[in-house]
Image (cartoon, grey):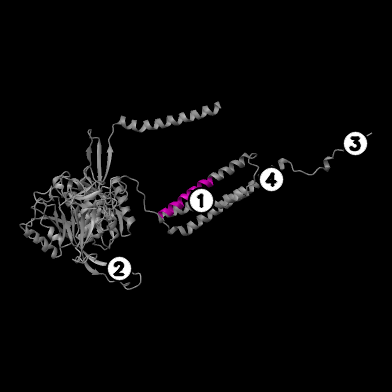
């Protein structure tokens, strides 16, 4: 018979000792408290150390740099305590101690905000130190200087200072200060100052005493060039910077305002940087473009470009070569699209002018635009300078504008490079009924096939503009060519008198004055010696591109002409895209339309948010 024996239950005193849950939670809470207090003490200590360093060494910093440095210190000082809090914080008590949980989460939020501000401050410092001075996403590039202004201020040999007699906080003052900052971002040679004529009487009187021309009814901007008590200066009037606003629209409620600050200031600097004046004369008597016509719609006037030239300190005049000699003070002669041939004595005067050191800009029209003959009488003279002017019509089937002979030309389309067009390679030039103007190619020696052509003399002709090369897809028909039978309205490629594309439309001619001294000459791998050249003339196969009509529609056309003149007169720092007028449109509304425009979008957004929140609440409570 089996004996049923039961094991005696262990006595409580024999069981292993186990801490109660309450005791464990107490230890966790105590550890959390120690870690939290230690992290806060470490955080406060690092903040005090950062404050001491700023107090000891931050007095030399500017206010903006001081604030950025303080923000970085405040963010980085919390990095150590946050790491300690994350590593040493015991797990398991979050659900039991609500106060500790809120404290931990609150500290994490505070540190996260501080770290975010610190990262933004560090990013701001990096961008300010190594990044571009600003970003401009406006359509009119309001906060970007044009290349001509940049080239000019970077070439300054003396300091330039703008003194604006405007209240700094006014709307014109703010616009001017933004423009001054753009100039100062490009060079250390430009500074600015504001003098309030009404609030600061003492300084105003000092300015008027030093610059008497500045004492006018309207506020002005004084441009000084050079140091010392009596620097060269120019006074820019208020009307030159802020022209009167004009009303537009059928109900006259749209007001268009213009800001010509960059144009006025850049022109003022250009006039001060060189005391030597440039005189440019336009020929008359053969139907050339007239400098006296400034109407924007006039296709026979060139007055808009004349005004731009005068803004750069160029003296512009007219000369009838049939009656007078070329003036002795003439630097550049412009022949802008003659409609009848020049007389032989006039051509001789042009030749003598070039031989005497003058410069020439010649612009030709096609035979359909001229009165009778397509010859101007200048062809043989330009041939002596390696320029060939042909009687044909440039056609481009890819880059035309509403007409095969109205071309939107891309400077540098054939990878040419020249200081006149280097800044225009992303722009377009509009030409209408242009003829071919190219560098003259010398003939090879007779009986010597395959031999290189003989040197063409001391003159070098570079193509500036040309049509698009290549063929059309699927047809192998050339994209561009020069049509020789254009007078018969037979515009088809492949004719005997045609010239295959790309067709050169403008050339610049310079004289080779020999090699410049090169200290690396003869060394292995040394580049060829740089050539010294002298600008002589620029020839265009079209004159209408410089007329008021096309310049008003495409301002880059005037840039091309001005760059050519500045290249000829040796002012390379003025070459580039010229400053444009910044326009803004202000719409005037009555009270009802104003409040409707303000409150209707706001009401729609609020209704949408309320509807979205209500939908979320209904869905969550239903399911």
Residue 21 location, x and y as percent?
72, 40
Precedes in sequence: disc 4 or disc 2: 4
In the image, farthest residue toward the right: 1
**Residue position for label 2:** 528
- Disc 4 on helix, strand or loop? helix
**Residue position for label 3:** 5
Q: CA distance from mark 3 to mark 1?
A: 73 Å
- Disc 2 on helix, strand or loop? loop
Residue 418 picture quarter: bottom left
**Residue position for label 1:** 75
Residue 528 position (above or below residue 420):
below
Precedes in sequence: disc 3 or disc 1: 3
Precedes in sequence: disc 4 or disc 1: 4
Precedes in sequence: disc 4 or disc 3: 3
Other-residue count near label 4 (Cα within 10 Å), few / some / many at <14 / 14–19 / ≥20? few
From the image, state whether disc 2 or disc 3 is nearer to you: 2
Other-residue count near label 1 (Cα within 10 Å), few / some / many at <14 / 14–19 / ≥20? many
Disc number for residue 27: 4
Q: CA distance from mark 4 to mark 3?
A: 44 Å
From the image, state whether disc 4 or disc 3 is nearer to you: 3
Q: Which residues are magenta?
A: 110-128
């Amino acid at each position: 018979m089996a004996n049923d024996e039961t094991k005696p239950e262990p006595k409580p005193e024999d069981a292993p000792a186990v801490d109660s849950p309450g005791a464990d939670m107490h230890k966790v809470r105590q550890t959390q408290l120690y870690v939290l207090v230690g992290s806060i003490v470490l955080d406060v200590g690092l903040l005090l150390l950062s404050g001491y360093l700023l107090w000891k060494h931050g007095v030399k910093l500017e206010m903006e740099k001081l604030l950025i440095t303080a923000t970085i210190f405040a963010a980085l000082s919390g990095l150590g305590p946050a790491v300690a809090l994350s590593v040493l914080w015991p797990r398991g008590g979050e659900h039991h101690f609500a106060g500790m949980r809120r404290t931990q989460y609150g500290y994490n939020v505070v540190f996260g905000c501080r770290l975010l501000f610190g990262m933004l401050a560090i990013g701001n410092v990096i961008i300010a130190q190594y990044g571009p001075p600003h970003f401009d996403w406006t359509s009119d590039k309001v906060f970007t200087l044009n290349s001509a202004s940049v080239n000019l201020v970077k070439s300054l040999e003396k300091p330039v200072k703008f003194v604006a007699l405007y209240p700094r906080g006014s709307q014109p003052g703010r616009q001017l200060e933004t423009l001054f900052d753009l100039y100062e971002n490009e060079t250390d040679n430009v500074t600015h100052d504001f003098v309030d004529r009404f609030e600061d009487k003492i300084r105003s009187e000092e300015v008027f005493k030093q610059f008497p021309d500045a004492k006018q009814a309207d506020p002005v901007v004084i441009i000084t060039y050079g140091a010392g008590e009596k620097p060269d200066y120019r006074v820019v009037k208020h009307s030159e910077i802020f022209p009167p606003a004009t009303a537009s629209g059928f109900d006259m409620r749209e007001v268009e305002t213009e800001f010509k600050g960059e144009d006025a200031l850049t022109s003022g600097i250009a006039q001060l940087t060189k005391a030597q004046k440039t005189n440019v004369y336009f020929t008359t008597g053969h139907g050339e473009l007239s400098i006296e016509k400034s109407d924007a719609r006039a296709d026979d006037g060139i007055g808009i470009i004349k005004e731009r030239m005068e803004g750069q300190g160029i003296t512009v005049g007219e000369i009838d070569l049939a009656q007078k000699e070329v003036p002795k003070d003439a630097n550049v002669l412009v022949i802008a699209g003659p409609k009848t041939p020049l007389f032989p004595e006039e051509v001789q005067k042009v030749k003598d002018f070039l031989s005497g050191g003058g410069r020439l800009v010649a612009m030709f029209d096609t035979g359909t635009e001229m009165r009778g003959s397509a010859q101007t009488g200048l062809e043989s003279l330009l041939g002596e300078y390696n320029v060939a002017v042909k009687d044909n019509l440039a056609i481009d089937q890819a880059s035309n504008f509403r007409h095969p002979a109205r071309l939107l030309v891309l400077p540098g389309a054939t990878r040419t490079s020249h200081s006149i067009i280097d800044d225009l390679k992303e722009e377009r030039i509009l030409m209408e009924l242009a003829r071919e103007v190219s560098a003259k190619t010398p003939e090879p020696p007779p009986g010597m096939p395959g031999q290189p052509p003989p040197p063409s003399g001391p003159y070098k002709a570079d193509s500036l503009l040309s049509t698009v090369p290549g063929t059309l897809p699927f047809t192998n028909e050339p994209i561009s060519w020069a049509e020789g039978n254009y007078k018969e309205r037979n515009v088809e490629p492949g004719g005997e008198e045609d010239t295959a594309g790309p067709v050169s439309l403008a050339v610049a001619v310079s004289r080779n004055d020999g090699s410049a001294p090169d200290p690396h000459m003869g060394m292995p791998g040394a580049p060829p010696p740089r050539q010294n050249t002298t600008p002589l003339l620029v020839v265009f196969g079209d004159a209408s591109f410089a007329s008021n009509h096309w310049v008003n529609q495409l301002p880059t056309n005037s840039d091309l002409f001005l760059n050519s003149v500045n290249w000829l007169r040796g002012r390379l720092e003025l070459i580039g895209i010229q400053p444009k007028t910044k326009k803004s449109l202000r719409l005037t509304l009555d009270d009802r339309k104003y409040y409707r425009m303000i409150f209707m979008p706001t009401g729609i957004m609020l209704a949408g948010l309320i509807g979205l929140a209500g939908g979320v609440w209904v869905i969550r409570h239903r399911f």
